[in-house]
Amino acid sequence: MAKVRLEGITRRFSKATAIADITFTVPDGQFWVLVGPSGCGKSTILRTIAGLETTTSGNLYIGDLLVNQIPARQRDVAMVFQNYALYPHMTVAENLAFGLRMRKANEQAIRERTQRVAQILNIDHLLDRKPRQLSGGQQQRVALGRAIARQPQVFLLDEPLSNLDAQLRDDTRAELKQLHQQVGITTIYVTHDQVEAMTLADQIVVLDRGQIQQIGDPQTVYAHPANRMVATFLGSPPMNLLSARYTSQGFWVQGQTLPYPPQLQSILQAEIGQMFDLGIRPEHLQVSQEAGDLTAIVTVLEPLGREILVRALLETEQTGTEPILTFQVKPDLGIQVGDRLSLQVDPNQLFVFNTTSGITLYPPKRNAN
Ligand code: ATP
């Protein structure tokens, strides 16, 4: 096991900069997740660590060793891709043992190690089968097992669950977490799925357009996003965004006024009339029997079982410009499409972003990264 340090890593292709000035250190034994939308550069970072991609500038260390010039096969990292390829003519046991045989481990050690890995991954009853005799989830576990069996210093996973169906994905995700607790290998995991990022990570690295937006533990990044991109990317359903004008009475949103917390005035130091982007997480919008802060007309109901996902149009002074609000309600409220709802927002739960830069102004920054 080893820590991994990236120092100012940049990778430019002829037409684009895939990643720019990436710096972070994954401590020994931790599980870090790189997350962001398609094209944000997460696979390029992973491939750089694996040695499958060259860097334009910057330094990469595995343990204390500078590995910029060290070829992939000598880096002692194992990588599992979305399209993992098992050797079809080999049994599961042979697939698991492959990396160890290549390294000329002795047969006794290979047998013991494959057995142990198969037990951890719950595939020990499948050791004699060929890959075509396995389900997708079992094949995925063999691919993970083959990487683990080598006992690499670092484990790199690139969207390893994306080919699985929803149920299997959830199960395998939980298994992965357990597996990491058992073997403790330093792991860097790439995904565009924020649920995977939140549930698996010790620390999340949120990326956008080749740059780090924020690094933090899942709860901190969710509650204290550095900017609008991070705030809207993490959370399902995503945060509601409203364009609002600052007034002495509150935030004016196309004819409706939202109160702000008292301390906001001194934090924002805003001028009356200045525009901001407001963020409201769906869980902070409550349907109220009394006159609330906002009124909205229900347009779509999506039953989720325990709750109903509601989409509603905010009532505005001007028709045709109504922003959509998303929130969840209990089924027993009996809400129907077309209902006019009164919504309450806890002012302390508001997020305020600079409209141009997107930087979070409220809640104020809590911890430096
Ligand atoms: P996805 O989730 O879609 O896999 P990603 O976040 O992993 O995306 P990367 O594959 O790292 O993104 O790509 C980052 C950027 O670099 C993209 O704009 C991509 O088009 C560009 N890029 C990646 N590889 C190359 C290449 N070999 N030549 C030119 N541009 C590339």
Image (cartoon, rainbow, N blue to C red):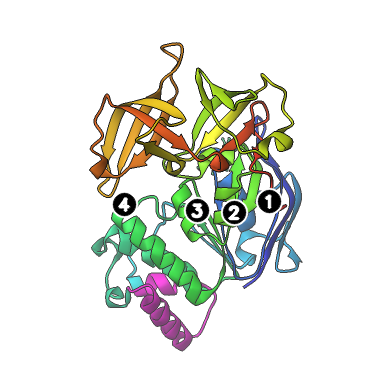
- What amino acid type is highlighted by mark number 2? Thr
Q: Residue at x 69, y 34 (%)?
A: 265
Distance from disc 1 to disc 2, alpha carbons, whole Å, reads 9 Å
Relative to residue 229, is residue 307 drawn left or right?
A: left
Q: Which residue is at a point 41% across and 12% down the rendered structure image?
A: 320
Label number found at residue 220 = 2
Q: Which of the marked residues, 4 or 3, is nearer the chain's N terminus?
A: 4
The mark that comes first in sequence, 2 or 4, is 4
User: Mark 2 falls on what kind of element?
Assistant: helix
**Ligand 1 quadrant in view:** top right
The tag earlier along the polypeptide, 3 or 2, is 3
Q: Disc 4 vs disc 3: Cβ atoms closer than 8 Å? A: no
**Mark 1 in CB contact with mark 2 (< 8 angstroms):** yes
Label 3 and label 1: CA atoms lie apart by 21 Å
Q: Residues within 10 Å of mark 1 (few under 14, many from 20)?
A: few
Q: In the figure, is residue 107 to the left or right of 34? A: left
Closer to viewer: mark 1 or mark 2: 1
Which of the numbered marks, if any, corresponds to residue 366? 1
CA distance separating discs 1 and 4: 35 Å
- Where is residue 52 shown, x and y percent of the image? 60, 52
The answer to whether residue 46 is visible is: yes
x, y percent for residue 360: 65, 38
Q: Are marks 2 and 4 in contact (CB under 8 Å)?
A: no
Q: Amino acid at mark 4?
A: Ala
Q: What label does residue 257 carry, if any?
A: none
User: Is residue 257 found inside the magenta-colored segment of the image?
Assistant: no
Mark carried by residue 197: 3
What residue is disc 4 on? 166
In depth, the one of 151 and 369 nearer the eye is: 369
Q: Is mark 4 within 8 Å of ligand 1?
A: no
Secondary structure at numbered mark 4: helix
| The image quarter in which residue 95 lies | bottom left
